[in-house]
Amino acid sequence: MFSPSINILLAGLLPFALYLLLGKRMIAILTAMKAGQPIREACAGVNAPEHQGKVGTPTMGGLLLIASVLVATLLTTDLTSPHIHCCLLVMVVTAFLGFLDDYAKITKHSTDGVSGWFKIALQAAAALACAVYLYHTLPEATRVHIPFYGGSVDIGFFFIPFALLVIIGSSNAVNLTDGLDGLAAGCMIPVCLTFILLTGVSTTTPLLLAIASACMGFLWFNCYPAKVFMGDTGSLSLGGTLGAVAVCSGTELLLVIAGGVFVSEAVSVMIQVGWFKYTRKRYGEGRRFFRMAPLHHHFELGGWKETQVCVRFWIITLLLCFIALTSVII
């Protein structure tokens, strides 16, 4: 541990610098390993030339992203903090899960990775360990801040299932958002910076800065046209860690606001699947509520270019972050 100012400086600059220094080398290694990203057939029809051109783009760029966050976190945070214990646990477990999923897709040359039930089970195990640990270690962890209310509510034992919902939901929501060049990382940066302001100067500040910094370094190579994708290795881990930060700080409902783009992506998939099943049972054929899910593909099929979707979703994220910040002032 260094002085607080040095810790903040290292957390904000080191991951970005590491990604710039090692990014090209990592991309070359992934390319040589033929760790190319499979593209879903359904997605290939969306702006076909753009998405067909992504076939073979190396994935698992999240390995360096998460590694750089871990290095910065271990150097700059209070490693005795229960908050850091929980966040690191969720980060490592979900990164490992994402790696298994990416590896399965690459070796199978398919978009089918590990089973959905296995994903949920491993995410739930990490989230449960985090929730139970906080519940027995920090009594104040059960208090949830209510936006625009100016206070918090103690939810007692219900904190445990609520924490599971937040961490698992956040992990999968960011994963679903990671479907266009720069979309997930570009939305993650302002959300992380907003949570630094929402939580004040706390033990998770260097971690949040490190995530934002690593995402900026990754975005250097992931901006359109992407030279590398983060894969599930990065997206599941980033989302899970962000959910863990919210659980640790009692800002779960603020995450729903600031991370509204992530939430809308996840909800669009649930609506699409639910509506398809309902209409198939009711009318004998499945119908779609959206042109395509997740939501970013719905807008692509509506005529928006990939870059337009990304920039507009970034703008919406900035506005939602402003609303989240405002909700704690009013």
Image (tube, rainbow, N blue to C red):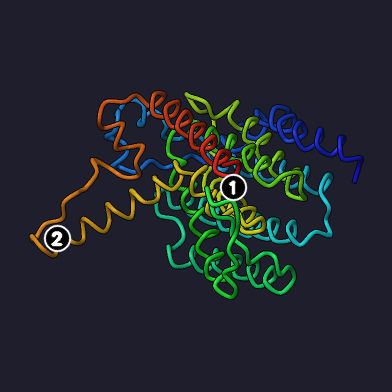
SS assignment at label 1: helix
Pick whichever, 310 or 113, lies toward us: 310
Element under label 2? helix
Q: What residue would you read off at disc 1?
A: 238
Decide which of 138, 177 is in the foreground and name it.
138
Quarter of the image with the C terminus is: top right
Type of amino acid at the residue the image marks with label 1: Leu
Q: Nearer the viewer, residue 215 or 50?
A: 215
Left or right of 15 on screen, residue 45:
left
Residue for badge 2: 280
Q: Is residue 94 visible?
A: no
Q: Position of residue 38 (x, y in %)?
A: 41, 42
Q: Is residue 256 visible?
A: yes
| Residue name at image x 51 percent, y 38 percent | 323
In the rendered view, would you say 31 is above or below 164?
Answer: above
Q: CA distance from mark 2 to mark 1?
A: 35 Å
Q: Residues within 10 Å of mark 1 (few under 14, many from 20)?
A: many
Q: Position of residue 238 (x, y in %)?
A: 59, 47
Q: Residue at x 67, y 36 (%)?
A: 214
Instruction: Decide if residue 215 is on the left or right side of residue 319.
Output: right
Q: Position of residue 144 (x, y in %)?
A: 59, 60
Above or below residue 327? Residue 307 is above
Q: Which residue is found at the position 41% from the left and 24% from the top?
A: 307
Cβ–Cβ below 8 Å for labels 2 and 1?
no
Q: Is residue 65 above or below residue 104?
A: above
